[in-house]
Amino acid sequence: MDNTKHSNLLISAIKTLTSNLFVSNFDSALSLAYEDPQYGLKRVEKSREFSEEYENHKLILSADRDIFHPEYKDQKHSRELTPEKVMEHSMFKAACSLIGEQKWENCSGRVENYNSLNGAINSLFKVLNNLSFKRDKGDRKIRSSTYDIEHIIYAVISDYFVSDDGNLRERTALIYKALDIKTLVLSPAQLVSKLNQLDALE
């Protein structure tokens, strides 16, 4: 299948699944808005150069653990690191303390301070990297984590965060728990099961 045909099928599927709804970051607030996915794709393409620079920046930051926390590079440490141990770790507690208790959504479901939310999630994600909790390995995975973080942020106003990446699900669940965010973290199979349950209730 050629790229154009594949792209058109993907756009058509997105339109069907979303009814052209997407999460918008407008005036430092997250809310639902309408946008034709074809237009959205063109908009994203215009910022490709910036995206590549940001990916490179993330790649450089990923070396922080090796420089400042070499004690967490040990594979035994990584295997034994549970979500509970992360929550009790002084580095994670310090980050949570700096973030403080915040209510991310208002009564209408809008996240009114995107910059604070972005900073909080990026900070906790970096701590998880430094502690080697479900850490991405290899340049390609580290670059893609740039977009993983965006998905974590934008899903805050959704009922579900869905990913087939088990490590990302565990990281996201831990971050949401620390920030008292109610979005459920599911695998695609769990989402299908959940939707089937909801259908059965109707």
Image (cartoon, rainbow, N blue to C red):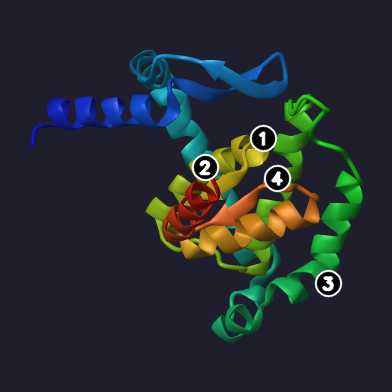
Q: Is residue 116 left or right of residue 190?
A: right
**In the image, what residue occupies the spot 54% across and 56% down?**
186
Dot 2 and dot 1 residues touching (CB under 8 Å): no
Dot 3 and dot 1 residues touching (CB under 8 Å): no
Looking at this view, is 162 or 195 the one in front? 195
From the image, state whether disc 3 or disc 1 is nearer to you.
1
Provide the residue designation for mark 1: 157
Provide the residue designation for mark 4: 121
Number of disc labels: 4
- Tell me the CA gap for discs 4 and 1: 14 Å
- Tell me the CA gap for discs 4 and 3: 18 Å
Task: Estimate the x, y position of residue 67 in percent, counting from the top left.
Answer: 64, 63
Provide the residue designation for mark 2: 146
From the image, state whether disc 4 or disc 1 is nearer to you.
1
**In the image, what residue occupies the spot 59% across and 75% down?**
73
Looking at this view, is 84 or 13 the one in front? 13
Task: Estimate the x, y position of residue 191 in percent, counting from the top left.
Answer: 48, 53
**Helix, strand or loop at mark 4:** helix
- The N terminus lies in which quarter of the figure? top left
Provide the residue designation for mark 3: 88
Which is more N-terminal, label 2 or label 4?
Answer: 4
- Tell me the CA gap for discs 2 and 1: 19 Å
**Helix, strand or loop at mark 2:** helix
